[in-house]
Image (spheres, grey):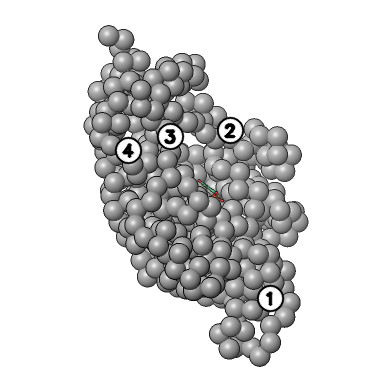
Amino acid sequence: MKNIPFNKPFIIGHELDYIAKAVAQGHLSGDGSYTKLSNRWLEEKLGCQKALLTHSCTAALEMAGILCNIQPGDEVILPSYTFVSTANAFVLRGAVPVFVDIRSDTLNIDETLIEAAITPRTRAIVPVHYAGVACEMDAIMAIAERHELLVIEDAAQALLSTYKGRALGTIGHFGCLSFHETKNIISGEGGALLVNDERFNERAEIIREKGTNRTQFFRGEVDKYTWVDIGSSFLPSELVSAFLYAQLEHAGEITAKRCHICSAYAAQLQPLQQAGKLRLPTFDGDSNGHMYYILLDSLDTRTRLISYLKAQGIFPVFHYIPLHSSPAGRKFGRCGSSMAVTDKQSERLLRLPLHYAMSDEDIMKVSNAISEFFAPA
Ligand SMILES: *Cc1c(COP(=O)(O)O)cnc(C)c1O
């Protein structure tokens, strides 16, 4: 029996050649030629004035926390239904994450609940584009402007998705991308900070280089480099950037394949939705095929379906334990709205296998197994 894993890292082009070239060039630390090529690729393809590769999206979020000048006791508004780094990056600065419920259609932060969660301590909003589907950015940016807040888009899942023609990650003051092996374009671990407001350019470079002005020194803008601010080591090695650049060269193909897998799942599972057995996600043509999930009627059905699929070598996954009910979320954060939708959907959501190497046959096998679960032959 051939197993169908949830995810499978893949190579699509010149990954190994470029790693060999990086070695031959004799530059393996950060900011060599492949990091620069990747930064430029992101700037050109996404339409962003400055992209800086990092070693993870978590690192990019942490850089954004420092750049926003978050102080202890400040508040940051974000969904509870997200990965821990969305909150943790700001908790590291002493901030209180204030959780707001999600919309039941996209599972993105419910923009109509944000304003009521704002207090005099609020400094920033962190919308998360769940499954690569855009949050309501016009409404969110208007709220931010009215209350003089900064917006950090957690676009970890959203590379090459758009909102009204603009790339996700380029709309807020900052955008954070991930190239973790479970995302669309991968480098094992990896990420990028998109700086969309040039007032932050210089400090972003300094924070990324351990609080030094080394980047300006290499450009010949200062005659020696020194410690000028707080910071950390947020650069990826050239080995990682070389792998990443080879993937970026095939980004269109990878995105198209993932969108195809999502459409194929949707076509196969449509009858089950019509029969009221499950709910399928609603995607528009502007998203990047990052994820395919189904919403079941209860936690019990989800648990039984997972066992049923695993017995057939199919490995779906669920996430997230909502942050407001996690031990650290309770300790450091608070709720800024009811959590009714978050609590309900997080127990019912199941992510189906989705990776570049999946065949149409694999998709059929997963879909058929789900159909058989609901209508045993
Ligand atoms: C994957 C993910 C992250 C973290 O990305 P890393 O590159 O693993 O640090 C953050 N936020 C969201 C929404 C994610 O899906």
Labels 3, 2: front one: 3
Identify which residue, 9 or 93, lies in the foreground. 9
Identify which residue, 338 or 236, lies in the foreground. 236
Q: Secondary structure at mark 1?
A: loop
- Which residue matches tag 2? 321
Residue 358 badge: 4
Labels 1, 3: front one: 3
Residue 212 visible at all: yes
The answer to whether the beta carbon of the residue marked 2 is less than 8 Å from any atom of ligand 1 is no
Q: First in sequence: mark 4 or mark 3?
A: 3
Q: First in sequence: mark 4 or mark 1?
A: 1
Which percent across, then down, holds residue 26? 53, 73
Give, as a three-letter code, the residue at label 3: Phe
Q: Is residue 127 left or right of residue 294?
A: right
Residue 4 lies, with reference to residue 58, above or below; the image says: above
Q: Could you tell me how far apart the alpha carbons at marks 4 and 1 are, in whole angstroms?
A: 45 Å
Give, as a three-letter code, the residue at label 1: Thr
Q: Could you tell me how far apart the alpha carbons at marks 1 and 3 are, in whole angstroms?
A: 41 Å
- Which residue matches tag 1? 212
